[in-house]
Amino acid sequence: MKQIRSFALALAIAISAAPAFAADTLRFCTGGEGGFYESLGQAIGTSITKKTGGELEILNTGGSVENAELLKDGDCDIGILQADVVSTASLPADIKVVDAHTEVVYWLHPKGGAVDDFGDMEQDAVAAKYAFAAVTGSGALTTVRNWIKTDKDYEGARVIEFDDWYGAAEAVAQGYVTKAGVRIEIAGMLYIGRPGKISGDITEDFGSQIVIGEVNDSSFANSKDVNGNPLYVQCVVDSASTSGLKTSSTLSPDTYCLKAQVVYNNAYHASLPAKEQRATRRAIDKGINSVVKAVR
């Protein structure tokens, strides 16, 4: 409710501001329809366009990875992306990146499973027996690939991709998946989202079969985001952040958190006259900052 009231306040302030000029349509890449990225994008975009006089177009997407592709292709001007997607994607050179809210990296594994800590996959014997599950095009897939690249001890780990979270969760819940007639043991999967907001595709049908484990590996703590700040920050999954899932540890599981970031392509205002460029940059700065402060 607090975040909803903050959005409402930000929108009300934005609407009261009279635009001094008219800019082009601002294309904002968000996430799934009805999701938090869409709500955040709507609030930020409205705040900006009420100052610039331009139109706002909200683009619903598959999330961070698709948003990065659309930004690269010039099909959107601003988007919300997971911080490690920003740092690993080849985005346009002239961008502005602002931290928004915090997201949790959840290690989800089958109840009673052998790999209750992501870090166990460093062991060659464990990596030889088990694979990670991941959803194609998800931010979590970016994270697991980035971690494998960061720490060479994970080089032997395999990643099995699924089309959606339901399919991945089903494989994690049963502890294996069969591909081309071959049984592959699944250790678990990463899921990244706001605290306590694990997808219903996971919790509703598999809540009694999947538990939250830990990520104990200091190798990722030195990674930096595009602004030079820590990319992954050690944190815990407290009781309010489990979405009703059980944990495999008696204490709050250790893990990492990272930021969602608002990425703006400065090319949006590059063709405007100098005075309007300055006014647009101010509108962008104020529009982003006035909303993200409310959700940090």
Image: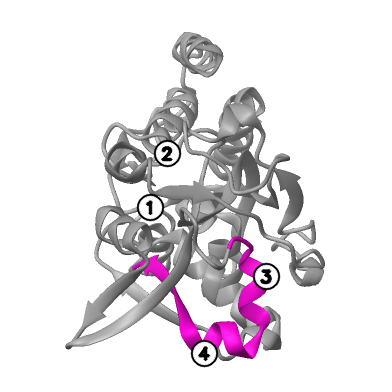
* Sequence order check, earlier mark of 4 and 3: 3
Which residue lies at the image location 53% right of the left edge and 64% below the top edge?
A: 85
Residue behind mark 3: 119
Q: Which quadrant would the C terminus be assigned to in this image?
A: top right
Can residue 4 be seen in this snapshot?
yes
Can residue 283 be seen in this snapshot?
no
In three-dimensional space, the C-alpha distance between marks 2 and 3, rounded to whole angstroms, equals 30 Å
Give the numbered dot on residue 37: 2
Q: Amino acid at mark 4?
A: Ala
* Sequence order check, earlier mark of 3 and 1: 1
Q: Position of residue 17 (x, y in %)?
A: 51, 13
* Sequence order check, earlier mark of 4 and 1: 1
Residue behind mark 1: 63
Q: Position of residue 284 (x, y in %)?
A: 56, 37
Asked if the residues shown at circle 4 and circle 3 are in contact, with their CB atoms under 8 angstroms apart, the answer is no
Asked if the residues shown at circle 3 and circle 1 are in contact, with their CB atoms under 8 angstroms apart, the answer is no
Q: Nearer the viewer, residue 182 or 48?
A: 182
Q: Amino acid at mark 3?
A: Gly
Asked if the residues shown at circle 1 and circle 2 are in contact, with their CB atoms under 8 angstroms apart, the answer is yes
In three-dimensional space, the C-alpha distance between marks 2 and 4, rounded to whole angstroms, equals 37 Å
